[in-house]
Image: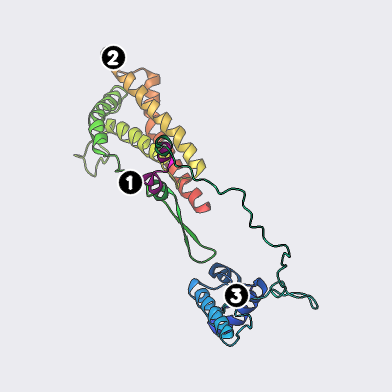
Amino acid sequence: MTTPASMYPRPVQELLPAARALAVRLGEVPSRNLLMRELRVGSPKATALREALHHEQQDQDAGQVESTGGHRGLRLVRDTPTGQPAEADMPAPVDPSPVSADVSADPVPVAPSDESSAGSGADLPSPVAEDTAQASSPVVVDGHPDTKITTGVPRPVRSPVRSWVLLLLAAPAFVAIWSGWVGLGELTGFGVVHPLPGIWDSFAVNTAITLPIGVEAYAAYALRAWLAPDGVPPRARRFAAWSAIGSLVLGAAGQVAYHLMESAGITAAPWWITTVVSCLPVAVLGMGAALAHLLHTDQRQS
């Protein structure tokens, strides 16, 4: 019998009739977990219901004294069909034949030898091993019947990897990459320009610095989106992976091209190298905008 849930918690006196019916049906006082599951109550009310059932049964037994001098206590009888005696009221069958008292021989105790006693001591379980097994086994804490909290041995917390090693590696790489891209830009026509003529004539910018900033910054941005643990949609992660690999390969090819032309004494890059390098700022801008669009659009859809 399952009592439907109510919006307001019911008192113990209101739940007591249902608990009595459950005890009669089972033939014994139900356990705390069974009361919690059948009546949909918490642990305190289930404990209170069990105590009330025990008190009621003790009060009933206190007023009844059996003629055979039986013990007072909880005596619940299962429901039986009409006309059939209950199993608890039926007398136990008595064997008419007397118990035989003949014993052929008394068992002779055998004293254990030194070797057997030494061997038996080795077979005994070690108390240290039992304590270790009990400490490592998970413990289940009883609460509400729908809630089970399992606790185990906590895992050791590892300290995060220090980032100063990455800074030490990035410092010389930054100098080499920056100088290579700037040198390649000067060989392909990048140089000093005045972006604000007539407004700020003295303001000048060397456009060769746009190559290392654009290409390497996008490579780091795409690499971060590719290797992020979670929160990145699959489509954006795939695009970030391929574009990050392409940016790193393109950056390595630019460094190789600059050093080869510098060692050969070339003062102007061939036309096809100039064409590829001139398209890099536009390509980097397009890939960066596409990756940002994929990240934000897929997150809103999910």
From mark 2 to mark 1, how far is it between C-alphas? Answer: 57 Å
Amino acid on which disc 2 is placed: Ile
Where does label 1 land, which residue?
A: 157
Magenta segment, which residues? 119-131
Q: Is residue 42 above or below residue 280?
A: below
Residue 173, horizontal then vertical, whole percent: 26, 28
Q: Which residue is mark 2?
A: 266
User: In percent of the image, x 31 and y 15: which residue is there?
Assistant: 260
- Outermost residue on the bottom side: it is 63
The structure residue drawn at horizontal position 25% and vertical position 31%, both measured from the top left corner, is: 169
In the foreground, 230 or 43: 43
Q: Assign a secondary structure to mark 1.
A: loop
Q: In the rendered structure, which amino acid carries the disc numbered 3?
A: Ala
- Residue 220 locus on image (x, y percent): 35, 36
Q: Secondary structure at mark 2?
A: loop
- Dot 2 or dot 3, earlier in sequence: 3
Q: Nearer the viewer, residue 158 or 221?
A: 158
Query: Vertical placement of 10 versus 281: above or below?
Result: below
Q: Secondary structure at mark 3?
A: loop
The image quadrant that residue 203 belongs to is top left
Q: Indicate the quadrant where residue 29 lies.
A: bottom right
Q: Which is the main secondary structure of the residues drawn in magenta?
A: helix
Q: Which mark is residue 5?
A: 3
